[in-house]
Amino acid sequence: MNIQQILKGQVRNFLIDHYPKLVIDLDWPREFGHKIDWKNPRDINEKIQWLICYSDTNEWTRLADKYRVRDFVKERGLEHILTRLYGVWDNAQDISFDDLPDKFVLKCNHDSGSTLVVDRSKKFNKEQIISFYNDRLKKKFGYKICEPHYNKIKPLVLAEECLEDNIEVSKTSLVDYKVWAFNGRVKAIWVCHNRTSDDKFVNVYDLNWSYHPEYSVFYKYYRDGKGSVPRPKCLKEMIHAASVLSKGFPQVRVDFYIVGERLYFGEMTFTGTAGRMKQYTEDFLKQLGDEIELPPKQIPIKF
């Protein structure tokens, strides 16, 4: 990387932290072929960008933090759906491997894609793990696209219990239930399963668990799940939990896992796919956007 590229990256990062609207205005025509109408944003993608620029996102920072959000889940009376937390460290060198169970999950609290399952029955390189996480702790995830609220999270490494299930439809990963909710109103559930580094199978279900392939765009690593995930026995509990956790927020995606018949909280995401979703049709993006009631502007216009 030459000095010009470094300087260009530094300027973009500065703008993401202080003038995100300018970055979005530069990116949007390249990605979507048109500018955002900031006065009348149309779909969920555009409304998420509006919220990034014109609303108070301090709670996004707290609740996108995979560690601090646990207190929020407790505050909302849902402590029973949290996974066991074994330890938290701000330096991976301090991870107390000897005190952890035979199988556990490590992940960072401030990013995506850093989850690692550690199994003592299989070989693992402790020094490589330490190096990997110390490298991740130095990186601000919000600069990857334009999600400035992530940059305010204090980076940590968490060790949690490892959830496992033997559901027939998903052999390579837990089924991930991603619930779209709007100030207490649940609209739809996006389900991902058989996830690998190359692809994932996805399904959109309504609240009656009817499959809607017409809402999805299958491209790149998004494959048609063909409605193969069975209706969860704890569906009503999941919808209720998403409703409770989303209350007070114009929009949020609340993620869950299910082991056996037990519901577990995953995370809260306020900028799904950085608010640049292309895995849904224009019609469905508009339907989700119509659910969002934008608050009065709380941040002065910048650029």
Image (cartoon, rainbow, N blue to C red):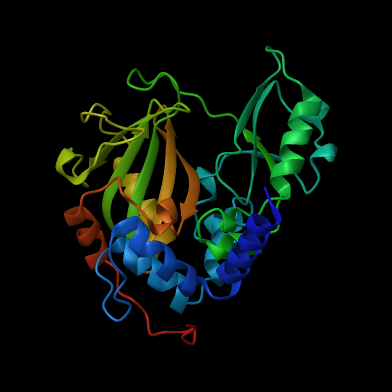
**Is residue 299 shown left or right of residue 280?**
right
Residue ID at (59%, 48%)? 111
Q: Place residue 48 in its image quadrant.
A: bottom left
Q: Place residue 178 in its image quadrant.
A: top left
Q: Nearer the viewer, residue 134 or 95?
A: 134
Q: Position of residue 52 (x, y in %)?
A: 46, 70
The answer to whether one can see residue 273 in this image is: yes
Residue ID at (21%, 50%)? 281
Q: Nearer the viewer, residue 197 or 76?
A: 197
In the picture shown, does residue 53 fall above or below 211? below
Residue ID at (30%, 62%)? 44
Query: Furthest residue to the right?
Result: 94
In the picture shown, does residue 181 fall above or below 258? below
**Is residue 277 shown left or right of residue 8?**
left
The answer to whether one can see residue 248 in this image is: no
Q: Place residue 94 in its image quadrant.
A: top right
Residue ID at (17%, 38%)? 213
Q: Position of residue 289 (x, y in %)?
A: 26, 64
**Is residue 190 shown left or right of residue 59?**
left
In the picture shown, does residue 257 fall above or below 168? below
Q: Position of residue 27 (x, y in %)?
A: 42, 62
Q: Nearer the viewer, residue 11 or 263?
A: 11
In the picture shown, does residue 172 fall above or below 178? above
**Is residue 6 shown left or right of residue 80?**
right
Q: Position of residue 16 (x, y in %)?
A: 56, 67
Query: Furthest residue to the bottom?
Result: 300
